[in-house]
């Protein structure tokens, strides 16, 4: 991937197309890619004909290097989640993300705030043990419990299996932390062409005092870098959310995420 301003890191096309494929397998519908002036649109069509690029807050534009895209270049009838730091006329701030750009694990460690590094040290000191081969069922149990606590929707139980099938085992990681042999925290991540995305993270509230989430996030970041990541995207946070501060402590630097509402009438879904 090319360098450039922190807010203008182009997302790899295979990353977004892979997520579109995974989403289509899990939720139905179909997806297509379209060339834009300034990027590549990855659009998913729901079974009822609604278009979005992409659903579930996933980014819908790959290969964009400009900080602002032409809103008129997007096809009608399709809402678009723009990539980190990229906007367009009429787009609205809907979330933030945090991203770490680095050349090495050591450099990434230095990017953590002091409190983030202290959290990693505390986790190790209090008996948290890293497990890079956590079972998908253990991830799902932790993530579903998190969703219930926050009043949200649990992830699809086949998400990990589907991502592995679409991207391959070398591109998907499930980094976990155990306390007393039990799964206490985990991070699901995907790496494509030097860009790693932390897809989901969860931890057991009963052991938060040991900071297993700090260790899980750091080990996921380090593992992705060791596999070739140069940019690590920490995922979405609503503005003002507490986890945004945590991601900043763990080395990510804040970037805005804009959503461009659908305009006009929907075009015809692909057949």
Image (tube, helix red, strand yellow):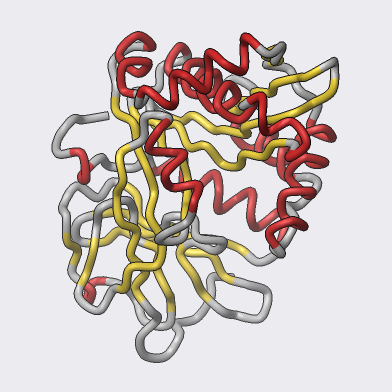
The residue lying at 41 percent from left, 17 percent from top is 228
Q: How many marks?
A: 0
- Viewed as shown, does residue 248 lie left or right of 63? right
Residue 101 location, quadrant: top left
Nearer the observer, 104 or 271: 104
Q: Quadrant of the C terminus?
A: bottom right
| Residue 161 appears in the figure | no
Q: Quadrant of the N terminus?
A: top left
Residue 86: % across, % down:
24, 57
- Viewed as shown, does residue 52 lie left or right of 255? right
Residue 46 location, quadrant: bottom right
Nearer the observer, 184 or 189: 184
- Viewed as shown, does residue 168 lie left or right of 3? right
Q: Is residue 188 above or below residue 71?
A: above
| Residue 27 appears in the figure | yes
The residue lying at 62 percent from left, 39 percent from top is 201
- Viewed as shown, does residue 106 lie left or right of 160? left
The residue lying at 66 percent from left, 24 percent from top is 210
Q: Residue furthest front?
A: 209
Residue 204: % across, % down:
75, 36
Residue 30: % across, % down:
61, 63
Q: Is residue 190 above or below residue 58?
A: above
Residue 82: % across, % down:
34, 60
The residue lying at 63 percent from left, 55 percent from top is 23
Q: Is residue 157 above or below residue 268?
A: above
Residue 251 location, quadrant: top left
């Amino acid at each position: 991937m090319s360098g450039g301003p922190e807010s203008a890191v182009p997302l790899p096309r295979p990353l977004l197309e892979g997520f579109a494929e995974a989403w289509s397998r899990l939720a139905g519908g179909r997806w297509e890619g379209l060339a834009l002036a300034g990027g590549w649109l990855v659009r998913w069509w729901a079974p009822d004909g609604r278009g979005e690029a992409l659903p579930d807050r996933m980014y819908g534009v790959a290969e964009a290097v400009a900080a602002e895209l032409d809103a008129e270049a997007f096809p009608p009838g399709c809402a678009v989640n723009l990539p980190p730091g990229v906007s367009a006329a009429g787009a609205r701030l809907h979330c933030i993300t945090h991203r770490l750009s680095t050349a090495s694990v050591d450099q990434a460690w230095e990017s953590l705030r002091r409190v983030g590094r202290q959290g990693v040290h505390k986790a190790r000191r209090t008996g948290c043990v890293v497990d890079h081969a956590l079972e998908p069922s253990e991830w799902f149990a932790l993530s579903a419990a998190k969703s219930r606590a926050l009043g949200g929707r649990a992830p699809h139980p086949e998400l990990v299996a589907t991502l592995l099938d679409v991207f391959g085992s070398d591109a998907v990681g499930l980094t976990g932390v155990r306390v007393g042999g039990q799964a206490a925290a985990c991070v699901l991540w995907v790496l494509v062409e030097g860009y790693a995305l932390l897809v989901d993270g969860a931890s057991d509230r009963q052991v938060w005092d040991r900071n297993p989430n700090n260790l899980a996030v750091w080990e996921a970041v380090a593992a992705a870098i060791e596999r070739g990541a140069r940019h690590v995207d920490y995922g979405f946070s609503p503005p003002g959310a507490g986890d945004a501060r945590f991601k900043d402590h763990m080395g990510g630097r804040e970037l805005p995420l804009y959503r461009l509402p659908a305009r006009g009438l929907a075009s015809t879904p692909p057949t």
